[in-house]
Image (tube, coloured by chain):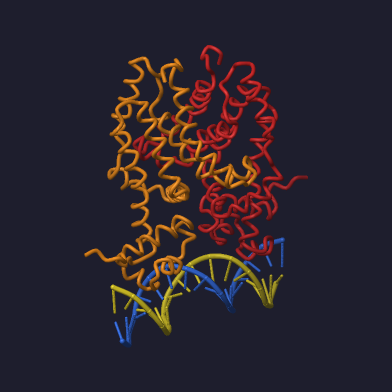
Chain colours: A orange, B red, C yellow, D blue
Amino acid sequence: MVSVTENTEQKIIDAACKVFILKGMDGARMQEIADEAGINKALLHYYFRSKNKLFDRVFVEIFSGITTLLSDVVSSSADIVELIDNMVHNYIHLISERPFVPDFVLHELNRNPQLIVEQIKLNGIDFSKFQQLIINGVTKNKIRPINPVHLIVNILSMCIFPFVAKPIIMGFMLNGDEAKYQHFIDERTEHVTTFIKNSLFINPAEK
Amino acid sequence: MVSVTENTEQKIIDAACKVFILKGMDGARMQEIADEAGINKALLHYYFRSKNKLFDRVFVEIFSGITTLLSDVVSSSADIVELIDNMVHNYIHLISERPFVPDFVLHELNRNPQLIVEQIKLNGIDFSKFQQLIINGVTKNKIRPINPVHLIVNILSMCIFPFVAKPIIMGFMLNGDEAKYQHFIDERTEHVTTFIKNSLFINPAEK
DNA sequence: GTCTATAACCGGATAGAC
DNA sequence: GTCTATCCGGTTATAGAC
């Protein structure tokens, strides 16, 4: 029989995710994580020896969620159009549910680029597949030639940046109106896919 | 006669900029800033009462550099094509020289969105001008209609994100090769302007 | 496994001499 | 204005009872 309350280790990890994502490694406090998990501070050290070890554990968990999505989308898409649709839709959807994850991941990665090394082997992107989809699109005369790295960076940029830059967008462009921002995000999937396709397709009628 | 060595206050601000940008507010240490400035820790508190006050001071300085550039570009561009060229070129150039600034600004802004409030009045974007350039482009039948907010976010995304995401791009797409990343950045201005224009112009021959 | 209490340390801030 | 020495609060981490 499955217990209604998760075990302590999982409660700690969930709490740590929440606090680390919101405050970052440097800003997070073990006390706050303990409170969030509803346990004592000493118990954190019993399960995970140190703050650093706890952080490493949750970072891997959070980061792999992002990369596996990318891998899945690339490997499951039949052509470049499908890939763009899937990638934009899935990323915006994923981040909408945890909007502070991108800033957390990017910030911690810049603080300590070493963090990424282990992740790469674990969750490498199948670039040959991605490149092949582009080549196919080009040879069938559907899209302009484009550097795959630039294209994938363009897609990720336009999907992820609007969440990281929320304060700027709201403050400077939407008069601090939360509802307007939400509406902006709701339009985003449709806008970005159209914007990218308009750029890629030589003949707009094709898209 | 101008002294060769800047005064102490300026030395502190320069050092604080450097350390805060690299480590963030939470990760920075007053001792490290003092060392970087070549002075004693107590002197920091003599000039700026607290870590918070010192941070606020340098944040304003760093952030205003970014927004004034945007304002200048918008107000000095005669049409939408010029604006895109100027904006992409200037932003990528600016950030290339201080590549850790975007992560710093975005992270601190997410940690404390209040920070932006004072900045807005100080350096608001002239949106009407920007919108007018787009409308002019559309009515002269040069570009497709587009939501100004989405367009400006697209431009900023594709210019800024590649710097914030450097560890990811290098790790996952460029085999950790620093030279490849530098080459990628060198191509970026040309690529992004072309990508945007391809998307905006209905007839590619026009651009 | 979980708790309370406390050790050990670190970092921002101040006192006071020069 | 600049320094040395020090205080004091907060935070990680451990000891030890239950």
Picture residue at 36% right of the left edge, 65% below the top: A50
Q: Percent from the top left, x then y, of residue A22? A: 48, 56
Q: Percent from the top left, x then y, of residue B178? A: 41, 36
Rendered image quadrant of residue A76: top left
Q: Quadrant of the C terminus of chain B?
A: top right
Q: Is residue A196 left or right of residue B201?
A: left
Q: Quadrant of the N terminus of chain B?
A: top right
Residue found farthest to the right: B1
Q: Is residue B1 left or right of residue B195?
A: right
Picture residue at 33% right of the left edge, 57% below the top: A57
- Report the label total: 0
Q: Is residue B112 above or below residue A196?
A: below
Q: Is residue A190 above or below residue D6?
A: above
Which of the pair B1/A25 is nearer the observer? Answer: A25
Picture residue at 40% right of the left edge, 25% below the top: A147
Q: Is residue B53 above or below residue D12?
A: above
Residue found farthest to the left: A1
Q: Is residue B186 above or below residue A169?
A: above
Q: Percent from the top left, x then y, of residue A187? A: 51, 36
Q: Is residue A71 left or right of residue B159?
A: left
Q: Percent from the top left, x then y, of residue A117? A: 33, 46
Picture residue at 63% right of the left edge, 66% below the top: B42
Which of the pair A141/C7 is nearer the observer? Answer: A141
Residue found farthest to the top: B205
Which of the pair B200/A57 is nearer the observer? Answer: B200
